[in-house]
Image (spheres, grey):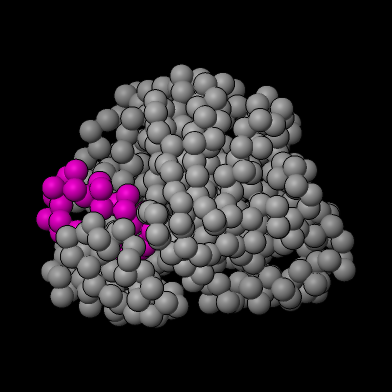
Amino acid sequence: MFSKILIANRGEIALRIIRACKDLGIRTVAVYSEPDITSLHVKLADEAICIGSAASANSYLNIPSIISAAEITDVEAIHPGYGFLAEDTHFAEICESCKIKFIGPTAENLTLMGDKMAAKDTAKKAGVPVVPGSKAVVKSKEEALKIAREIKYPVIVKAAAGGGGKGMRICHNDVRLVSAFLTAQREAEAAFGSPDLYIEKYVERPRHIEMQLLADQHGHMVCLGERDCTIQRRHQKLIEESPSPAIDQKTRKKMAEAALKCAKAINYVNAGTIEFLLDSNGSFYFMEMNTRIQVEHPVTEAVTGIDLVKEQIRVSAGEKLKFKQDDIKFHGSAIECRIIAEDPDNNFMPCPGKINTLHFPGGYGVRLDTHIYQGYEISPYYDSMIGKLICHGKNRHEAISICRRALDEFVIEPIKTTIPFHRRVMNDTSFMRGKFSTDFVDKLFGTIE
């Protein structure tokens, strides 16, 4: 087992990793940008090193500074969390060349699944259904128009090198496609350093279902069930739950088998997630693989009792998984609400600023992953998610009831957050019945640009 790990991230995920390390008796090193000097992950790590100014490019994406911090503090491994460098093949290769263990998949895994077209091709070769679309990167708007007319509208334009809704546009006609193609290229270039795009048939009113996988370095792999991530805005998730109310046991088994096929096809190692679109007829299609820990991993932890971050560390240290597929048991239902410093009544506009009043919810079935505290200044420089409320009950009805109670207790002032949005969702008839699709938020609030 490692004796010291550097956490190359910030916010609640950095704190989450520090806590897992402390439980395992591992010392931790936090890195931080200048404005993050007051962040909790800096205070709770055993050591902390400033790696640059506010801009991510100068700090959390600054590979030379992070590697220097790792070498100065003599760590054996780096955990990248999610976002930033978590799926950066170059970073993983540099860690390897410096004899520092990258806590995540291999550089080869990252390469194969980081390119969305290559990932789709891998899934297709593994016998997993994929959404019809371009067979390679689309280079021009003329080529985009040709493909769209072949597979028929609506289509969706996606960045080949990224995720999180960046470089992604839905198009219903030629005019919209030409405009969206050029905009998505610029956005993809800015976000991922690559303007490459691809085009898929847009599955209307789908469910977004993902399967959590965990694999060790000795050829053992398990599926830890699904998460329903259908409730989103701008293709970014707001609420996740496990199990999904949209699939039966037969479909669940098929999706798990498909996910395992994809991952085994590339000899995947560590935690990873295969994401699927589920249409209104019950058919599902491979969408992408996330080669990292997910924001929503706590709902899987709640229903399985397995600490995914600790397992990531153990697997990276060369340990074998201590459980097999038949050992995985699911208990109850869990729902995660992303607490984001955004105003849901103002098109989800970010709301940075100082927290003057704060009260956390508690009680049976409530878990809160967050790095905020009273007096904390929410930075305008980074992602506006400030916490995750996870509620676990013996069934979905109880989980929703616990969520309602916890949200009513949760106070963050004067910052605008998504807490009122989540209260509204938990009392929505369609949500309570489990009958919704990816257009749920648009229907609740009107179309969000």
Q: Position of residue 448 (x, y in %)?
A: 74, 55
Q: Nearer the viewer, residue 308 or 46?
A: 46
User: Residue drawn at (49%, 36%), measured in percent from left and top?
Assistant: 409
Residue drawn at (49%, 71%) of the image: 381
Residue 243 horizontal side relative to residue 52, left or right: right
Tell me if residue 441 comes above or below residue 249 in the rendering.
Answer: below
**Span of residues in magenta:** 1-28
In the image as oriented, which residue stretches furthest toward the top? 394
Residue sitting at x 52%, y 60%: 384
Task: Pick whichever, 417 or 81, lies toward us.
Answer: 417
Of residues 205 and 9, the one drawn nearer to the viewer in this rendering: 9
How many circles with numbers are drawn on the protein? 0
Q: Quadrant of residue 206?
A: top right
Residue 291 located left or right of residue 423: left
Task: Specify whether residue 137 is in view.
Answer: no
Residue 172 position in % (x across, y down): 84, 57
User: Left or right of 109: which side holds 436?
Assistant: right
Q: Position of residue 280 (x, y in %)?
A: 74, 34
Determine if residue 187 is in view.
yes
Quadrant in which the C terminus is drawn: bottom right
Magenta includes 27?
A: yes
- Residue 413 position, x and y percent, is 52, 53
Give the camera-side residue of 312 and 387.
Answer: 387
The vertical placement of 293 against 182, above or below, is above
Q: Is residue 43 left or right of residue 25?
A: right
Residue 402 is one of the magenta-drawn residues: no
Which residue appears at 36% of the width and 69% of the height?
Answer: 36
